[in-house]
Image (cartoon, rainbow, N blue to C red):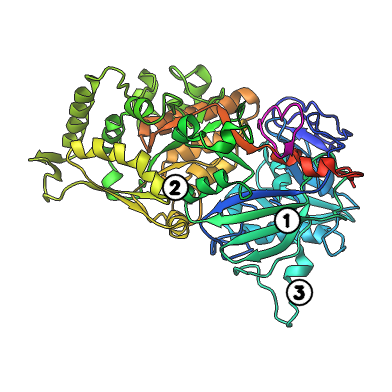
Amino acid sequence: MAARAGEWHSSVSLIGTSKYPDDFKHYDYVNPDAPVGGTLNQIAIGTFDSFNPFIVRGTPAAGLPNFGGGLLYDTLFEQSPDEPSTSHAMIAEAMTYPPDFSSATYRLDPDARWHDGEPITAEDVIWSFETLKELHPQWNAYYRNIVKAEKTGDREVTFTFDQTGNRELPQIVGDLTVLPKHYWEGTDENGNKRDISQPTTVPPLGSGPYRIAGFQIGQSMDWERVPDYWGWDKATRVGRYNFGRIHYTYFRDQNAAWEGFKKGGLEDYRLENSSQQWAEGYDFPAAQNGQVVKTEVPDGQVASMQAYVLNNRLDKFEDRDVRKALTLVYNFQEMNRTLFYDLYKRQTSYFDNSELAATGLPSERELKLLEPMRAEIPEEVFTEEFTLPDYSDRSAARTYLREALDLFRKAGYELRGNRLVDASTGEQFSIEMLGSDPRDTRTLEPYARDLRRLGIDVNIRIVDTNQYVERLRNFDFEMVGMRYYPQSLSPGNEQRDFFSTQAAETPGSRNYAGVENPVVDKLIDAIVYAENREDLVAATRAMDRVMLWEYYVVPQWNKTEDWLAYWDKFGMPENGPAYSGIDPFSWWTKAAESEAGAPSAGN
């Protein structure tokens, strides 16, 4: 951490020093005088049935946080969109920590308020920490090394850790979403005690820049800007959150959402994730006459793993030879050429587009970590650079199919006619591919065809969004095409929720592949307790290459720019944030700009 131990800081970074001083007024890229007003229209997929995003049950409404504060809540510190692994003061005005990283103390801003005018207190922070760890495996894993939070001053909370040397923990404490203790421990208008452990359709009390203004369960959500929000003068807020209202309309699937975008008035901007639509779909009248603008924005963030994720909890995927065979069969080059207009590149790492990605053979620093566990690691980790099948030569298909079949035979399977079966039971090897949208078949079916050529019985099953989410939460799937949650350039405690043995058997965790590997567990600890940047990078690369050689997933594709399309209703800063590329909350509406005497964003 660049901030010095023992000093109070309102800006902290895990990578170098933040370009912003502790007393900065606003991000460089924003317009501090951006006009306020107008409506941002957005589309959400599926449905919702709860305003409580902090429990495993229920489907939270759009705008509520999956991580962080969302529209409704604030956090102690806020992660910067302009720099990687950097956070700035929010509810807490400053933080400090000792040289051994054994604790962190956060000092609350005396102006911080809930929407009901009550001050945000140390008791709120402590209650939030204890409650979130109890309610959700994500937070339990993220803050596993924090043993207690206690009030150590009128506006100070100290978090004590169970070990020293975890350089990330003092900063990630700042990610804590702070909830109103007095609200959740109180009673509603009917005298019933509120229960944060249950779903709710009553709009809860928040502290953030927006509050719930109206809703129709499963159909729409309306958020309104809070005029007397306590944080408008905070550096992270000036020139941002300028929309007077944010409206979400729910659609059943992506096809319907696409039609909604083209219609106008339902989705004002869209981050396109379909190469087919990006290449050919923007031929509708509004796009042709300039009402809809297309642009590509460079993205400096880590390209997290996107893959056909195997559920390694299942016996059928237990053998690494089977998993490798499934990887050999996937023909990315053909899909990229015939479906994706050659717009993607192959995903080759869990940390693509960054220095964290494993390349070549292990470095000396990596070998220091890997050699003591050599007997538990695939030998190829030490002797070969990890590569994926290359189908550029069309004759390669036969070669890879033969290699895959040999691996299946080694694992105890044989080809009987055109069926790949267990040699001892005669049962055909089968896979169910799970999707949540009819359009998913476009990327599932080509791989399914490749697998069927090997004699595998493949079934594609498309379910509604709620069922899909529930099945992922409970690891009730065999294979699913998905992109993992975003990785940062300074990975740490969140890796436990992604890849640890403990998370593999914890419903609601993000270890979708079911990675249960003591080597990975030890490498996660090496990441968490890395003493410097060089050790952190080495440990991350070591974990990356071990997981790649274990073939837990079949890597798909990625891109290093964002495809942005938007209706021409916005004013925008000249430049976006250097790190995240796009910050829609720094935009404003032209309608608000044209209104005489429009107030500034800080009012």
* Residue occupying the point 47% across, 52% down: 253
Vertical side of 153 occupied by 498: above or below: above
Neighbours of disc 3 within 10 Å: few (<14), some (14-19), many (20+): some
Query: Residue 273 or 76: which is nearer the viewer?
Result: 273
Taking the spot 11% from the left edge, 48% from the top edge, the residue there is: 424
> Could you tell me which residue is drawn at 37 percent across and 22 percent down?
387
Crowding at dot 1, Cα within 10 Å, few <14 / some 14-19 / many 20+, comes out as many
Q: Secondary structure at mark 1?
A: loop
Asked if marks 3 and 1 touch (Cβ < 8 Å), the reply is: no
- For marks 1 and 2, the one nearer the N-term is 1
Q: Which residues are magenta?
A: 569-583
Locate the N terminus by quadrant.
top right
Q: Position of residue 463 (x, y in %)?
A: 39, 56
Q: The disc labelled 1 sits on which kind of residue?
A: Leu
Q: Which residue is mark 2?
A: 512
Among all residues in the image, which is located at the extreme left?
417
Residue 425: give x, y in percent of width and height: 12, 51
Between disc 3 and disc 1, whose residue precedes?
1
The quarter of the picture where residue 340 lies is top left
Report the Cα–Cα distance between label 3 and label 2. Answer: 37 Å
